[in-house]
Amino acid sequence: RCAGACCGQETPQAHFLRLQASLERLRVVCWPWKGAIALKESRPQMTQFHIINNWLWLGAVPSLDEAATLVRTPAGFDQDGYKILCKPLMSGQYEIIELHTDCRQS
């Protein structure tokens, strides 16, 4: 929203700080892992692993051995997917297993 930077009602410094604050809310966290990960979801009767790479959910499998079957090339950045995945991945509430490049744990 215009606060009058072009007509002297707002200083250039104030405009810049406002711009930085607005852009910070849109900032995307860089993928913090070397490659694909498995997010472990466990319930009394079920365990599944959500396979995620570069903020792209590849699918869910019942065992890590099946992780290699999930191969998908992203069409582009999915902002909705990022918003959905960011909270559980960054919260520390779920076990996260880094997968090797062949998508299987050794």
Image: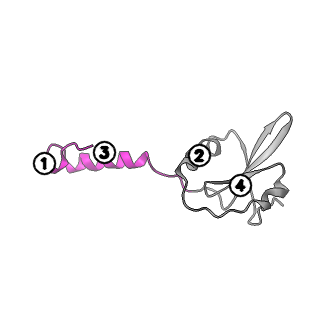
Give the answer, above or below, for where 41 lies relative to 16: above
Where is residue 69? Give x, y as percent: 79, 61
Q: Name the residue under label 3.
A: 18
Gap in angstroms between the C-alphas marked 3 and 4: 36 Å
Kind of residue at disc 2 = Cys
- Between circles 1 and 3, the one closer to the viewer is 1
Gap in angstroms between the C-alphas marked 2 and 3: 25 Å
Mark 2 is surrounded, within 10 Å at the Cα level, by few (under 14), some (14 to 19) or many (20 or more) other residues, namely some
Q: Name the residue under label 2.
A: 86
Which of the two labelled residues, at mark 1 and mark 3, occupies the earlier sequence position?
Answer: 1
The answer to whether residue 9 is magenta is yes
The answer to whether residue 101 is magenta is no
Residue under the image location 69 percent in, 59 percent down:
36
Gap in angstroms between the C-alphas marked 1 and 2: 40 Å
Mark 4 is surrounded, within 10 Å at the Cα level, by few (under 14), some (14 to 19) or many (20 or more) other residues, namely many
Horizontal placement of 28 versus 46: left or right?
A: left
Which of the two labelled residues, at mark 4 and mark 1, occupies the earlier sequence position?
Answer: 1
Q: How many marks?
A: 4
Residue at the limit of the structure toward the left, as seen here: 7
Q: What element carries label 2?
A: helix
Q: Name the residue under label 4.
A: 37
Quadrant housing the C terminus: bottom right
Residue at the limit of the structure toward the front, as seen here: 75
Gap in angstroms between the C-alphas marked 1 and 3: 16 Å
Kind of residue at disc 3 = Arg
Q: What element carries label 1?
A: helix
Residue under the image location 75 percent in, 63 percent down:
100
Q: What element carries label 4?
A: strand
Residue under the image location 55 percent in, 61 percent down:
76
Kind of residue at disc 4 = Ile
Kind of residue at disc 1 = Cys
Where is residue 89? Give x, y as percent: 64, 46
